[in-house]
Image (tube, grey):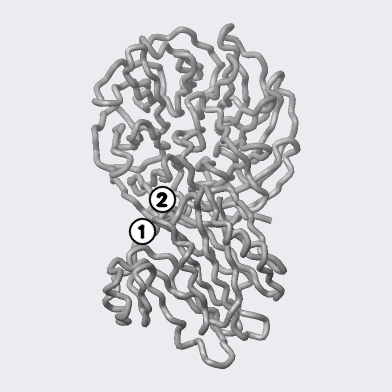
Amino acid sequence: MFGVIVSRAPLRRYERYEHVFHDDALAVLAVALFEERFDCTSIIAAIVSYDRVDPELAERLNAKRLSKSALRVVAGFSSRVEEPFRCERACQCDGVLAYSKPSTFCREQAIEGCIVLSLARCSRASERKEDRDCSKCPGRHVVAKAGWFPPGSWPRMMTMISLMHASVATCLVSIGAVAIVAMPQNRSDDATLDWPNFRGGASLQGVAKGALGDRFEVAWILETEGAITSSPVVAGGIVYVGSSDGALYAVRSETGKEVWSYGTDDIIEAPPLVHGGRVYFGSNDFYMYALDAATGKLAWKYETGDKIMGSANTWTSEKGELLIIFGSYDNKLHAVNASTGEKCWEYETSNYVNGTPAIEGGKIVFGGCDAVMHVVSAKTGKATETVELGDECHVAGSVALADGRAYFGHYGNEFVCVDLAKAAVVWRYGGGDQAFFSSPAIGQDKVVFGGRDRSLHCAKRSNGEKVWTFATRRKVDASPVICGDKVVFGSGDGRLYVLELATGKQVFKYEIGRPVYSSPAVSRGWIYVGSNDKRLYAFRPLER
């Protein structure tokens, strides 16, 4: 539950709602807004996140109304503020907050500016009550920083202001009334909403929980020193992604603030895997790495005979031993102990293993550049089935598993469905002159996958009959993600697309400008994707 109080008053007479600060209370957002004639109106919103809302707050919430058509405020909330700041102006500290007075832009007469008051918690309590020297105020948790927009440059919607709590929903103060709008939250204790590995789960189905909106904005951008073809993953409020600059980055999912980075000796194209407090990833330097997910400290690294391009997957034995399973360009599938990095077994093929192995029911399924689909026992590392796909039918992408069937594309210009029990191809799609590299997303009755024919394809799971295709301007090697009634994917044409799953109709497009071969991660309604422009993008949903 949360409540909002809105009060209209001149800046020089702003009120202090101290009664809302119960226990370890959250914040007061003090904002000076403009009116169309530029005479100042202040809105003081007290936001509280509790199971029980003070009845007085509710009463005030229902009683207050705004009539000026120009007023609109959007306040967003993040889990915490990383870098406290000191008050820059005279403050009146009562041991609860250190208040910054309006800046010199605020005149006694008409105010030609948009002021955001600075607020900060003061740690000195009674010592600070009469002391107005802000240079001495340590200002422990930042609530809002001061900002000013010069006359003539008024935004129609203020920038999202970061506050100090994960569980508070986004609040909207809109024209004519106080409106509360609950937007999808980016942070939650529900780990099932994470996207901890490539394609979101062990069977690599490429389906995210929740729903996607129709409109998005860029929340933040991470700059690296190399192209990002690695696909990001999200776990515990952190996004992990590799870069061609040889580093793995861990950044906060809501802000993009770097938590740590870890450098290797070659480019990182393999998507990471987060499991049990560790992050596992391969590099083109031939090593699989295991790092502490919180600190980036190395736990172990395991050397293979060539570069590692695909992500790792996990399987737990009957004895509780966790195995990290991945392929390498040394033609082998490797299984190592997750705790120690010691080899458990390896399975050798006759060519590169480029994709990520899918795992379901103790069976590991993957395709190789040997034009074979392999089924391997996770317990023994021995093959149980192989399916020959034909000459030149190299499998560079990853297999997705659902209901006893495997779905994948290959360089023989087909996308196929294989019955695992019969070890036989059930249906084939395509047959043109372009390969299928993208890994599929498996819906309830549809399968969606990209093609080098510059299109995203949707077919019926039952028989491979085409449902729709969506044309882009370049090849679609990135893998799509299904979330609710939408599908999101990137293209080599430098765009991120969101489509209706049922019809393939475009609902959102964002021009990045450089090829997108990174597959998106979707978590809590947000989209994270890398690009060849050396950047990782985070898109947050916009409420209508």
**Percent x, y for residue 446?**
68, 27
At label 2, which amino acid type do we have? Arg
Q: Residues within 10 Å of mark 1 (few under 14, many from 20)?
A: few
- What residue sits 38% from the left and 31% below the top? 275
- What residue sits 62% from the left and 19% below the top? 417
Q: Is residue 521 visible?
A: yes
Question: Which callout, 2 or 1, points at the residue further toward the start of the chain?
Answer: 1
At label 1, which amino acid type do we have? Glu
Q: For mark 1, what is the residue?
A: 82
Q: What number is the disc on residue 255?
A: none
Vertical placement of residue 390 versus 259, above or below = above
Q: Residues within 10 Å of mark 2 (few under 14, many from 20)?
A: some
> In the rendered image, which quarter contains the C terminus?
bottom right
Image quarter of residue 239:
top left
Q: As rendered, which of 67 and 187 lies closer to the eye? A: 67
**Mark 2 and mark 1 residues within 8 Å of each other at the beta carbon:** yes
Q: As rendered, which of 217 and 170 lies closer to the eye? A: 170
Q: Is residue 104 found left or right of 426 in the rendered image?
A: left
Q: As rendered, which of 135 and 283 lies closer to the eye? A: 135
Image quarter of residue 81:
bottom left
**Percent x, y for residue 118?**
43, 73
